[in-house]
Image (cartoon, rainbow, N blue to C red):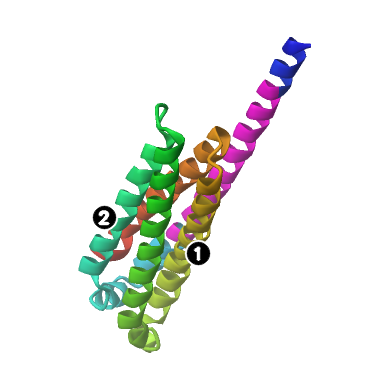
Amino acid sequence: MENAMTAGAADEDEADTFVLWVLIWSELAAFGVLIGAFLVASLISPQDFAVARLHLKPVIAAVNTLVLLTSGWQAAVAAGAGASVTTKRRALVLSALLGFAFVGIKIYEYGTEIRFAGQAAFHSFFELYFLLTGFHLVHVGFVAIVLLVVAWKPRRANVDLVTTLWHIIDLVWIVMFPILYLV
């Protein structure tokens, strides 16, 4: 009887892992398409994209990058093998709060940039910029809420799932940041 229960738990863990990887690869594919579209458009209109980039705020984006990476560090603390339930909860809540800070900073940044989006020469740049960063922003906000839900009852499988997804969101931003702000 015990072997059957152990086998059932192993099958369930395998299914959870499979679903997690399907989610991760689908997210990477979606962001890959958006980043690819941005890169292609920047090759088609390099001058317009170069001038439009001058209206971005790379310092604000760099600070926001540090906020997101610090949040990812707290997610890693929560997922640590020796982390107590209290440590997991605290780290998950801090990670979520930093995620919400990222959202707030990004919305502030949007406020400084939105006035340039209506200019005809910059239309393609800002359309793709807001689509790409907005899609990422929705992911940050949603997963930050999930981090709080998991913090309430931090089961190992749920902590692993949400922190892995959070790290993918970090990874996507690390790729996006230089493409959008520095290239």
- Badge 2 crowding class, 10 Å Cα cut-off, few under 14, some 14 to 19, many 20 or more, is few
Residue 125 found in image quarter: bottom left
Q: Nearer the viewer, residue 50 or 77?
A: 77
**Please, is residue 107 above or below residue 149 in the view?**
below
Where residue 38 appears, x then y in whole percent? 41, 64
- Mark on residue 80? none
The residue under the point 33% across, 85% down is: 116
**Can residue 183 be seen by looking at this rendering?**
no
Q: Which sits earlier in the primary sequence, circle 1 or circle 2?
A: 2
Judge from the rendering whether residue 69 lies leftward or rightward of residue 162; answer left or right: left
Q: Where is residue 122 in the image (x, y as percent from the top left)?
A: 36, 81
The answer to whether the residue labelled 1 contacts the one labelled 2, judged by CB atoms less than 8 Å apart, is: no
Amino acid type, residue under disc 1 in the picture: Val
Of residues 78 and 51, the one nearer the viewer is: 78
Label 1 CA crowd tier, 10 Å (few <14, some 14–19, many 20+): few
* Label 1, label 2: how far apart the Cα atoms are: 18 Å
Residue at mark 2: 66
**Image point 33% across, 76% down: which residue?**
108
State yes or no: residue 37 in magenta: no
The extreme right residue here reads: 1
Residue interval drawn in magenta: 9-35
- Residue pointed to by mark 1: 138
Residue closer to the observer: 131 or 11:
11
- Residue at horizontal 54 percent and vertical 48 percent from the top: 152
